[in-house]
Image (cartoon, rainbow, N blue to C red):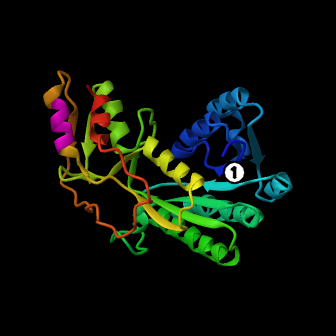
Amino acid sequence: MKNKTILITGSSGFIGNFFLENALNKNFKIIDVLRFKNKNNKNLNKLRKKFKSSYKSIYYKDVDEIEKQLKNKRIDFFINFATFYKASHSHREIVKFINSNILFPSIILDLIFSKVKKVINFGSMMQHLDGNNYKPKNFYSSTKSAFEMILSFYSLISKKTKFYNLKLYESFAKIDKRKKLIPTLIKNFKSNKKTTILSSKLELNIVHIDDIIKAIYIILNNNIKNGTYCLKSNKNIGIKKLISKINYNSKKKIKVKYLNKRISKVKKTKIKLLPSWRADKNIQNKIMEEFL
């Protein structure tokens, strides 16, 4: 797989950024497509200096500029990490959801689908409120499902390319600046602040970033049947139990306030696990290490 070229979107995001550095260290050649505003991204510029010959970026202000810069580029794989996520939306944000989650990856896909071997798209289990069918939790997840329908079209007209959708519930890494519950708990714990949690009954299904990256390489390196796969842990983590366990073992306590909001349980899913992939069983211990 050395010297293979991967085109990626969303390299400034959580999963995309972790994968970018990992793939460069494994001698893959990477081309990412970035909005012009990301030209001053310190982390990406640092990687660009370190991997001068293997990491190139395409910057654009308008999607029409992408075609010129992708022309004549050799690309073996395309991975779509790009996403604009918000739990809720206003009508003013609809264009941004559509541009990021549908329009942008669709244009790139249309330009390259005939010459790539594999396409990997990241989705969310928020697209499947019942665990299986397309029942979106919010506007964000409905746009992710819309792009998957577009992928289905290209899979019908491109028999030489394999298409994969990878679905996640929650993800975790030691370095995580997102406004998700676990990194928020860690941040507030270190600054001695209280965290408000919707319900004491909250459970999360969490997969470590290393396992997510492992799943990508399984697809790239093996003859996996194209389709949709779920990356999930065998057991959900009860947040109240997790916090109680940490507080029992630590002198410093996590400060929390539980609300009594109705929450959705993590639904069992019939979406298959990726073949040859299993989640780290010690994910809860890895989370606890950040507090102890």
Q: Is residue 194 left or right of residue 14?
A: left
Comparing 74 with 193, the one in front is: 74
In the rendered view, tell whether residue 240 sits above or below residue 189: below
Does residue 110 appear left or right of residue 156 in this picture? right
Number of numbered discs visible in the structure rendering: 1
- Front-most of residues 290 and 78: 78
Which portion, as a residue range, is magenta? 241-247
Q: Is residue 148 visible?
A: yes
Examine the image and state in which quarter residue 108 appears. Answer: bottom right
Left/right of residue 100 with respect to residue 52 in the rendered view: left
Identify residue type, mark 1. Answer: Leu
In percent of width and height, residue 54 lies at: 74, 37
In this orientation, which residue lies closer to the viewer: 113 or 100? 113
Say whether residue 82 is visible. Answer: no
Going by the image, does 151 lie left or right of 90? right
| Whole-percent x, y for residue 240 in the image | 18, 44
Question: Which residue reaches farthest top?
Answer: 251
Q: Is residue 243 above or below residue 5?
A: above
Dot 1 corresponds to which residue? 7
Instruction: Identify the image quadrant of the C terminus.
Output: top left
Q: Quadrant of residue 173?
A: top left
